[in-house]
Image (cartoon, helix red, strand yellow):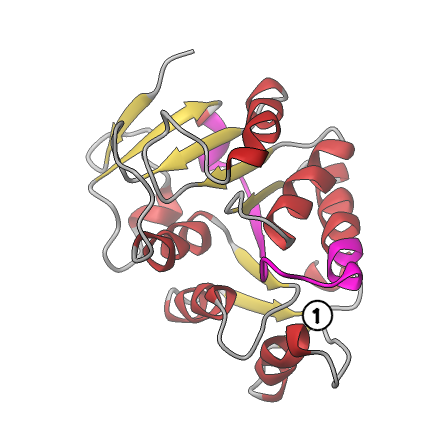
Amino acid sequence: MKIEEISIKDIEYPYFLKQIYLAPKQIYVLGNKEILREKSIAIVGCRNCSEYGKKVAKKLAYNIGKRNIITVSGLAKGIDTCCHIGTLDAKGRTIAVLAHGLDMIYPSENINLAKEIIKYGGALVSEYPIGVKPEKSYFPARNRIISGLAEKTVIVEAKEKSGALITAEFSLNQGKDVFAVPGNIFSSTSKGTNELIRQGASVLTTYKDLF
């Protein structure tokens, strides 16, 4: 399977992504490019998440996958990984947006997960061409693509300063609904999500809240 380049001028370019501020001029796709234009929900959160966060992310993604709705996340450790696994467990399809060229996988521990995503009808997406390695600044930038592909965004867990909160901000700026999962008030991994709720994000306690 080869990596395909889709220009913003192409009819195959995802409609929702085209509407965002600083939409990438081209994206690179490995896998099923057709799902980039289907209904999808983003699920993101911190890398160093709690067992509670892992359980919520997997169960939420599983129930969304069972409804034949695409999930979108970033293939990072923690909540992102749980999102992709939960979707695959439901025999659903998921999109992983990467912050580097698609000729590599970061983190390397998710190489097999990336293969499973493609095998079962999902896709890997990046705005970066082959050969581009991950840089710290690329990860916040890729978050606009995660939210841009999705109709709604769920933040499962987030620390006070977390990349997931950047995704939430992008979602709000794009006019998307943002949901946050409430957490233990004494847990550092729930400070960000609890603050989002305080600021007006929709509370999510079951996947049914999304619909």
Residue at 41% from the left image edge and 41% from the top image edge: 98
Residue 94 percent coordinates (x, y): 59, 36
The stretch of residues the image draws in magenta is 34-56
Quadrant in which the C terminus is drawn = bottom right
Q: Answer whether residue 115 is magenta in the image.
A: no
What residue type is disc 1 on? Answer: Val
Q: Answer whether residue 41 is magenta in the image.
A: yes
Q: How many marks?
A: 1
Residue at 25% from the left image edge and 31% from the top image edge: 129
Quadrant in the picture for residue 180: bottom right
Residue holding disc 1: 181
Residue at 59% from the left image edge and 84% from the top image edge: 195
Q: Determine whether 107 is above or below 176 in the image.
A: above
Q: Secondary structure at mark 1?
A: loop
Compare residues 132 and 127 and report the one nearer the observer. Answer: 132
Residue at 35% from the left image edge and 20% from the top image edge: 3
Q: Determine whether 101 is above or below 119 in the image.
A: below
Quadrant in the picture for residue 4: top left
Outermost top residue:
1
Compare residues 18 and 1 and report the one nearer the observer. Answer: 1
Residue 105 percent coordinates (x, y): 45, 32
Q: Determine whether 10 is above or below 74 in the image.
A: above
Quadrant in which the N terminus is drawn = top left
